[in-house]
Every structure is written in structure tokens, then in C-alpha cells.
Amino acid sequence: MFPRAAVPKRPYDHRHDSYPPHTPVSRCYDYSHQRLAGVNNFHGPGPERFPTYEWKPRPPAAAPVHPHTPTMTNERKRRNDEYSPHVVKRQRLEPLFRGPPPRCPDQALAGSSRSAVAGFDRFYPSPRAHIQPLLTAVPKSPNILKACFKDKLSDQMVEVFEACQQQASDLARKETCRARLQEDIQSVYAVARLYLTGSSMNGLGCRSSDADLCLVLKGNKRQDPIHILSVLQRLFKSLSYVEKTQLIRAKVPILKFREKGSDLEFDLNINNTVGIRNTFLLRSYAYADLRIRPMVLVVKKWARHGQINDASKGTLSSYTLVLMVLHFLQTLKEPVLPCLQRDYPECFNPLMDIDMVPDGPKHIPPFLSQNQSSLGELLLGFLKYYATDFRWERHVISIREATAFPKNKSQAWRNKYICVEEPFERNNVARAVHQRVKFEAIKAEFAESCRILQHRKDLNSILPVQTIINKELSRR
């Protein structure tokens, strides 16, 4: 258990709190994987379980594929000498938390209270399995956050999250395409392995999220990403299920493409394995507290609506926004989140073999936050922190240390408007904000939204809620 969670403290005193009192919620997750949890939404536990993130042979084509609950008792990872480039493998991800779901005092969690939308944290079938699309309506069942936090703003945030979060069918489609791509890529690069990373896998994605792919090519010879992506671009043009390929020669070169006949887009990089590492770090934070995923999703929707969430146009990337949210929640007087890299460095060692990365978070004990703030209070606090409290010109945002440390004269931070530390590579993920006019626009959006929301306590005042929901529900 974390030191600061050992002794109960007084609830976080929000400076501008005008909400009615709400029932305290226990938000404890078991990082040690001893119990199952309904981690996808705010209902009681169910039979769903996100499978292990391992590379395993696909079942024979003639055999029917049935969803199952994999066990970890006698399993082991495939050794390098057992690897066969001729075997198509399926990427899986084990839940990082199997602890009891949060519940309100005296509130029963009946199985019937679960939503019809099961979300994405369950088994997804092999490429040859038939995928049944899930319902896409906003869940009507009451959930734990709505029951505990009765203020309008929190209720609106939960509504947006429930409607917009990535669904099981969305992830299944991405996994199907990934598996087919890996099989085709192995006709050129026999030992290649293709990983699905980013928001699709860390629990922070929505229905409209693109899919990030990392192609891992191991070997002593240094690989030229541009050359490999050029080879893949030619290959992809011959594939019947891929269209609109585009090679982007950025600092981290990517190949953009789309699944044919749909709006599902992919970004593929070569050996950018830090993306796999931060996928599991962010996933650990995403499920550490029930409020994290809706908080992050609403912040990303707000930033996109305010036109400050596009690194290609000189504003903030979604990854940067996530780190800013996590930093805020780590540094409250009563933290909502721990500092996992500082408290458990062995679980997130940046030198850990990439195949061992998914196992790291299994050894982290539960964290119980004493902070009882509602979602609405946290959103207001987030906007206020960056509108009035945070010193942009002096400090670097760091979730690695759960602090804002002073800028030094290193190239990463010198003459940068916004400094947000990448938790593994320790460079500046906000370097896209290199124009003062963009920086001022970002600050202005924080300040104006903080002012409006503080006065109205209505999410519609800074975000068109129903429009956002309708747009997401129309996806795919």
C-alpha cells in the first residue's frame, strides 16, 4: 500500500465547491489480479474478462471459436527459439485490475443492473470468428457514479463516457485487421510482430479513436523506418482490405491507412516500443480509480471541441492531454492517483524486455484514494489548475515523479511554451506547441471554460453533449 494512503485524511476541499454532499465511494482496485472486476463501466462485476496480452497460435480454421476465460496458472511466454513466423498470432491483453468494483454504502450491486453495452474489456475473437456488433445506445441502467454523485455535471460526464467509450465490437474490428496485417507482413518480414497500442488498448479510447500499431522487428542490424514503411506501403496497396495509404515522414515516421469500406484508420510505426510501454502505464492509471476514464474522455472531447487538441496544428496531442489530467490528479492535496513509476520502478523499468512489459503491473498492490471529489469537481479543478495555478513558464509536468519540477536549460525545456515530460523517454511531448499564438489560445480556452463552468455547472456550457454523443453513436 502506498504510504500516503496508510492514514485516512480529510476529504479534498475543493475551493469552489457548491455541490450538494455526496456519498463517499470506495475506489480500490486490486493490481494483484486476485479477483475479477467490472472495470469497463460503472456496474457490478460480471463474467467478462480482458484476455492475456500474449502471442498464441490461432485455433484451426475448421474448429469453432468460442469465447473463453483464459487462466494464467500454468501458462508461460513463448521463447524466442519457439517462435514460428508461419503461425498467425492473436494479441490479447489481461486486465490489470481484478479488485472489487467501487460501491456506495448500503447499495447492492445486482447483476441485473449491468448495462446492455458491455464495453471493450472482454475477450475478442480471432480474425475468422464472426463478430456480433453490440448495442450502441446510451445505457439506461443506473450506475454507481450516478448513484453516488448526484450533481448534474458529474451525471453529464458519465453520460458522455458511457456513450462514447470504445466498445467490444470496435476493439474486435481493430484486432481482426491487426491479425490479418501481421499475417501479410510476415510474408515480407518473417519475424515481424504487430502490436496494437495507444488508446485502443489502454482503456482511454472512444468509438472514433484511430488504432495505433507498432511493428517490432528484432535484430542486431539497425532498421531504417522509412525504408520499411515504404516496403509496407507497396505491400498494402496490393491488399484487398486496405486503402488510402500515406507515408508520413515525421520524427517518428508512420504509415497511415484505412480499412477498406469503413472509417477505421490506422497509424503504423516501426520499433517505437515506448508506445507499448506507455500503453501499459496509462492502462494502469486508467483503471486505478473509477473516475479516471470518464474524466480523460470528457477532457479530450472538450479540448477537441475547443480546437486545442491537434498536434499537427500546433496544439496539444491527446497523449499530452492525458498526461496533464494524470498529473493534476496526482498532485491534489488528497491525490486521486498514486505515482506508479516512483513507487514501483521495477514494474515500469524502461529497460524491461518488451515481452515482459504487460506483466509488470500485476505486482502492484491496490491504491485507495481518500479523495471523495465528484467527477464534476475534478473537472472544475482541472480547468482551474491550468487556468490560474500552474506556472507554464517555470515548470515541467511529470507523472513519473508526480510533480511539476522546475525547468532547466536543457534543450528539451528551453524556450518551450508548454513542457510535459514523456514518462519513459523524458522528452517533451508538448513540443508541437511552438507558436505563441497557439499557446495563448490554449491558455484562453482553459480560462474561459473554467469561468463558464464554475458559474453554470453544466457541461453543455462548454461542450455540446448531445451532439458529441450522437456523433459517436453513429460511428461504425
Image (spheres, rainbow, N blue to C red):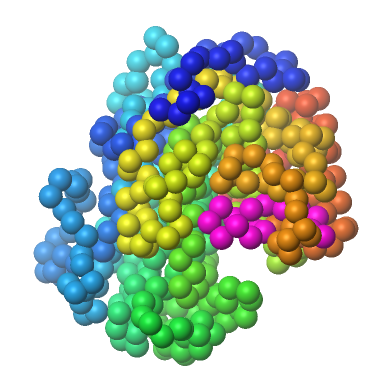
Q: Quadrant of the N terminus?
A: top left
Q: Quadrant of residue 380?
A: top right
- Residue 75 visible somewhere in the drawing: yes
Number of numbered discs overlaid on the protein picture:
0
Does residue 367 appear to the left or right of 376 in the view shown?
left
Q: Quadrant of residue 429?
A: bottom right
Residue at 31%, 86% in the rendered image: 187
Residue 104, given in percent of the width and then of the height, sits at 44, 16
Residue 6, given in percent of the width and then of the height, sits at 46, 20
Magenta-drawn stretch contains 428: yes
Residue at 29%, 37% in the rendered image: 33
Does residue 357 appear to the left or right of 250 in the view shown?
left
Magenta-drawn stretch contains 382: no
Residue 123, given in percent of the width and then of the height, sits at 28, 50
Residue 462, given in percent of the width and then of the height, sits at 75, 38
The magenta-colored residue range is 415-429
Residue at 23%, 71% in the rendered image: 80
- Residue 285 visible somewhere in the drawing: no
54 shown above or below 30: below
Magenta span: chief secondary structure: loop
